[in-house]
Amino acid sequence: MSMDLNLDFVEALDDIEKEKGIDKETLLEAIEAALVSAYKKNFGSAQNVRININEETGKIQVYSRKEVVEEISDPRTEISLEEARKIDPIYDISDIVEIEIKPKNFGRIAAQTAKQVVIQRIREAERNIIYEEFAKREDDIVTGIIQRYENNNVYIDLGRIEAILAPSEQVPCVTYKQGDRIKVYILEVKKTTKGPLIMVSRTHPGLLKRLFELEVPEIYEGVVVIEAVAREPGSRSKIAVSSRDENVDPVGACVGAKGARVQAIVNELRGEKIDIIEWDEDPAKYVANALSPAKVLSVELVSDKVAKVVVPDYQLSLAIGKEGQNARLAAKLTGLKIDIKSDLQEKSSRENMLFPLDLEKEGDNVDEKEEDT
């Protein structure tokens, strides 16, 4: 059997170079290295060989490499000076002599090995292309189809590759059904021996931000800016927006006509409530807005980290929210610790501060009267 790679195979390498972007010369070098390993495995691992493939014809040549020595201890890797000089008088001690050999049945092994190398390199190239494509999309959202649920992980088909939605990135109490289309946020893209590993999220605040960018043209165009996002996935979120154009209402742009824009995002997030509030450079006004839908009477900045808020008595439970959620989200959004009191509580605390002083004065007077008697 001929040891040559047929011309169809060689021409296929040219097509692979054009279509897959894999350099033909690099492929041939990889095939040559693989053929050396295949030769040693099948014909003796102790031998030193070099394999050359003609780029144009596909002709394979195998050369046994032997070192010129005075006394031979291993004929598989060494040759005497006398024998070497029969080949070419210029050889001297320590030179390497290459002798072409034609091992039997190596043609079949060579063809199989070359095919395997090419398939492997094509896979590697495709994996690299996919990796580069998704690595650029970290912190972005993609749409996929839920494939299966395995070991608490949800596997999502993104077309040419699957993404993993880990338990920690899944919204609690939400069922993920096979075949459902779903938007996910790309957290991280890793290179592994089995190809790119894409980790995605449904809980990350970035998902909410990207959904608004997709749904609201003014945000995509940069007229309306998302200043901050605070999220408790599956339950409630707050998003603070501002406008670079005084004629554009940032909250109205995000809500949309009859609430259509925000409703589309609520539907994608399976009913998660979203408060859209106007960002303000004045921290006091920003805190008041962040506590929406509650009405605020006053905001006092105790320090650059703490805000003291007073609300009407009937608005206290609304300002704090169920299990403190509204206040908690407002604090995340503004980056401040928010201390909320009702106006009645505030008046009561002021009176309590004054009352002990009055009692002390009254006590002093009693003592004075007793002394007089």
Image: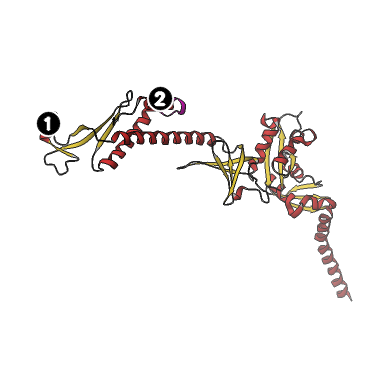
Residue 51 location, x and y as percent?
A: 28, 33
Q: Quadrant of residue 193?
A: top left
Depth order, front residue of 144/269:
144
Residue 184 location, x and y as percent?
A: 62, 41
Residue 274 location, x and y as percent?
A: 73, 43
| Disc 1 packing (10 Å; few <14; some 14–19; many ≥20) | some
Depth order, front residue of 208/265:
265
Q: Nearer the viewer, mark 2 or mark 1?
A: 2
Residue 55 location, x and y as percent?
A: 33, 25
Query: Which residue is rendered at x = 68% and y = 38% of the image?
Result: 227
Which three-letter amino acid code belongs to the residue tagged 2? Asp
Query: Which residue is rendered at x = 30% and y = 27% of the image?
Result: 59
Horizontal arrangement in the rendering, residue 38 relative to residue 284 (left or right): left
Which residue is outermost to the right? 373
Magenta region, residue range: 17-23
Query: Which residue is rendered at x = 60% and y = 50% of the image?
Result: 167
The residue identified by callout 1 is 85
Horizontal arrangement in the rendering, residue 22 relative to residue 158 (left or right): left
Element at badge 2?
helix
Q: Quadrant of residue 209?
A: top right
Horizontal arrangement in the rendering, residue 312 relative to residue 148 (left or right): right
Q: Is residue 69 above or below residue 232?
A: above
Q: Quadrant of the N terminus?
A: top left
Which of pointers 2 and 1 lies earlier in the amino acid sequence?
Answer: 2
Which three-letter amino acid code belongs to the residue tagged 1? Arg
Q: Quadrant of the C terminus?
A: bottom right
Quote the CA–CA distance across marks 2 and 1: 41 Å
Disc sitting over residue 14 in the figure: 2
